[in-house]
Amino acid sequence: MKSLLATLVLIALWVFPAQAEEFRAKVIGITDGDTLTVLHQKQPVKIRLHGIDAPESGQDFGGKAKQAASNLAFGREVTVRVVDKDRYGRSVADIILPDGRSLNREMVRDGLAWWYRVYAPSDRDLAKLESEAKEAKRGLWLQPNPTPPWNWRRGEGRAP
């Protein structure tokens, strides 16, 4: 009987997969180029943009990335498509702007964030957008060899 129940549960999960959380919310804060705060059900919710990593605030292009995210999203009603939770408890999500564009993808397209391969290894759209930004020398790709934030956070690429 237990194996039949387990089989039925597995079939139900396969037929009716869990839906990722999706909700509409107003962007009330921009921390940096890949982190923002939205107001959802009268509560602030910190969101980390899925699949991208923007320069840190003390890093070249960090301020420009934050400003670009702000220009695109601050004060706007967006759709939040939660993908995961990170180790800090933040929701990791795709942010869909009112015009249907993805904030995550726009940041990479404009050369203001890297495709974060470790967390979105199969995202071919981000891979293509990063390659195009690099080829066009947009944003941080104006630099000959920009330091990715994951290396910068470990102390690489900083002045001694």
Image: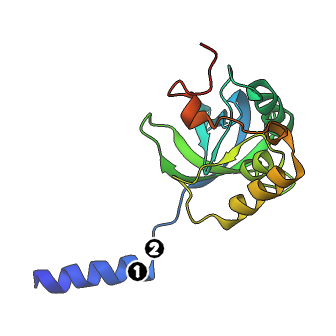
- In the rendered view, would you say 150 is above or below 31? below
Residue at the (82%, 51%) spot, across then down = 133
Return the x and y of residue 68 as percentages of the image width and height: 83, 35
Residue 141: which quarter of the image?
top right
Determine whether, in the image, residue 84 is placed left or right of residue 52.
left
**Residue most extreme to the top:** 160
Q: Which mark is residue 125?
A: none
- In the rendered view, would you say 44 is above or below 79? above
Residue at the (53%, 60%) spot, across then down = 20
Residue at the (10%, 85%) spot, across then down = 1
Residue 41: which quarter of the image?
top right
Please name whichever residue, 129 or 80, is drawn nearer the observer in this view of the structure: 129
Q: Amino acid at mark 2?
A: Pro
Q: CA distance from mark 1 to mark 2?
A: 6 Å
Q: Tell whether label 2 touches label 1 (CB within 8 Å).
A: yes
Q: Amino acid at mark 1?
A: Trp
Determine whether, in the image, residue 62 is placed left or right of residue 40.
right
Q: Which mark is residue 14?
A: 1
Return the x and y of residue 112 as percentages of the image width and height: 77, 40
The C terminus lies in quadrant: top right
Q: Which mark is residue 17?
A: 2
